[in-house]
Image: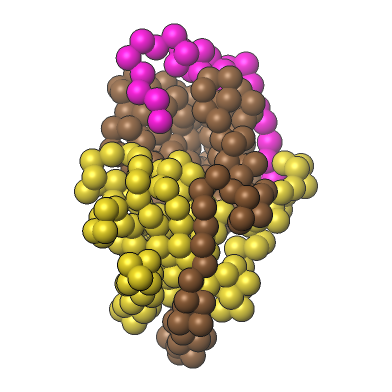
Chain colours: A brown, B yellow
Amino acid sequence: MQDEIFLREAFRLAKEGMDAGQGGPFGAVIAKDGQIVGKGFNQVTSTNDPTAHAEVVAIRDACRRLNSFQLTGCTLYTSCEPCPMCLGAIYWARPERIVYGCLHSDAARAGFDDQFIYRELDKSRESRSIPMQQLLPDEAWTVFGQWLEKQDKIRY
Amino acid sequence: MQDEIFLREAFRLAKEGMDAGQGGPFGAVIAKDGQIVGKGFNQVTSTNDPTAHAEVVAIRDACRRLNSFQLTGCTLYTSCEPCPMCLGAIYWARPERIVYGCLHSDAARAGFDDQFIYRELDKSRESRSIPMQQLLPDEAWTVFGQWLEKQDKIRY
C-alpha cells in the first residue's frame, strides 16, 4: 500500500516536471522507514545537464539529506524502469530495492530509446557507435598505484 | 599529440582530487576544437554524491559552459575506462569519441569493481542483486501519453 503511495508521488513529480517544462516525463522518489528522503524529476533540457534524469536527481537529493553517499535501507520509486546510466547510479548508491511503473519498451514508445544504450553497453569497445581508444596505459596506472598506497583513503 | 596532452591533464586531475581527499583516483577532461571545455575529478565521498564520478562531473561542467545538453564535436578524455553509469551518461551527452588510460580490469585491481555493475546490467530484472518490482503500469503510462500529445516538448 505504501509502495503505491510513493510510486504515485513519482508519477505526480513526472507530470509536474513535464508541465513546468523542466524536461522529460519522468519522476522519482526515495523513501526510508516510511518517509520520503529524496525526490526528483527530469531536468535535462532546463538545466543543460544530460545526467539530470529523475533517478539521479532523487539520488543526489537523498544523499545530501542523509549526509551519506550510500542509500542503505532505502527504496527507490521511479515512474519508469531506469536507463543504464540511472541503473549504474543506483548500483553505486546501493538502495535496498527498486519499484517502477513503466517498462523500457513503454519509454521507447514515448520516444526515449534507452534500449539503444543497453545494446551499446553489451558491445565490445571496438564495435560501439562512439569510438573508444586507449592511450598511455602505463602512465594511467600510476595514480591507481598511489591510491593503493594511500593510508587515509575512504572507500566507496 | 593533442590527445596525449589532454589525457595527461585527466591523469593530473585524478591525482589532484585524490591528494585533496575529494574522492577516488579518477580524472576527466572534455575538449572541443583543441580547447578544454570541461573537467572533473571524482568527488563521491567529499560531496556525498555517488554520481560524482570524474566523467559525470566533467560532462556537467562542459554542458554548463557550452550551454547545451549535448557534447557534439567533443572528445572525452578519462583516466580510466568509464563505468556503466558514466558510459550511459556519455551516450546521453553524445560526444564524438572517448580516449581513456586504464582499463576496467586495472580499476578492479585498485579496488573499484564496476565489472560487477556490467554483469548486473546483463542480467534479467528478476535475477539482479537489487530487487526490481513493477507496479501500477497503466497509471504509469498516463504521463507518457500526455508527453506524446504535448506540443511544445523539447526532445533530448
Residue A70 position within the rendered picture, expressed as x and y whole percent measured from the top left: 50, 59
Left or right of residue B35, residue B133 in this image: right
Q: How many marks?
A: 0
The residue at 41%/43% (across/down) is: B93
Identify the image quadrant of residue A113.
top right
Left or right of residue B90, residue B36 in this image: left
Picture layout, residue B149 above or below residue A87: above
Looking at this view, is A86 or A130 the one in front? A130
Q: State which region is magenta.
A: B130-156
Left or right of residue A104, residue B85 in this image: left
Quarter of the image for the N terminus of chain A: give it: top right
Left or right of residue B87, residue B17 in this image: left
Looking at this view, is A124 or B139 the one in front? A124
Asked if residue A120 shows in the view, the reply is yes
The furthest residue to the front: B1
The residue at 41%/21% (across/down) is: A15
The residue at 41%/47% (across/down) is: B95
Picture layout, residue B14 above or below residue B149: below
Identify the image quadrant of residue B18.
bottom left
Residue B62 position within the rendered picture, expressed as x and y whole percent measured from the top left: 28, 51
Picture layout, residue B142 above or below residue A52: above
Looking at this view, is A151 or B70 the one in front? B70
Residue A32 position within the rendered picture, expressed as x and y whole percent measured from the top left: 52, 47
Asked if residue A155 shows in the view, the reply is no
Residue B53 position within the rendered picture, expressed as x and y whole percent measured from the top left: 43, 61
Picture layout, residue A143 above or below residue A102: below
Magenta run includes residue B152: yes
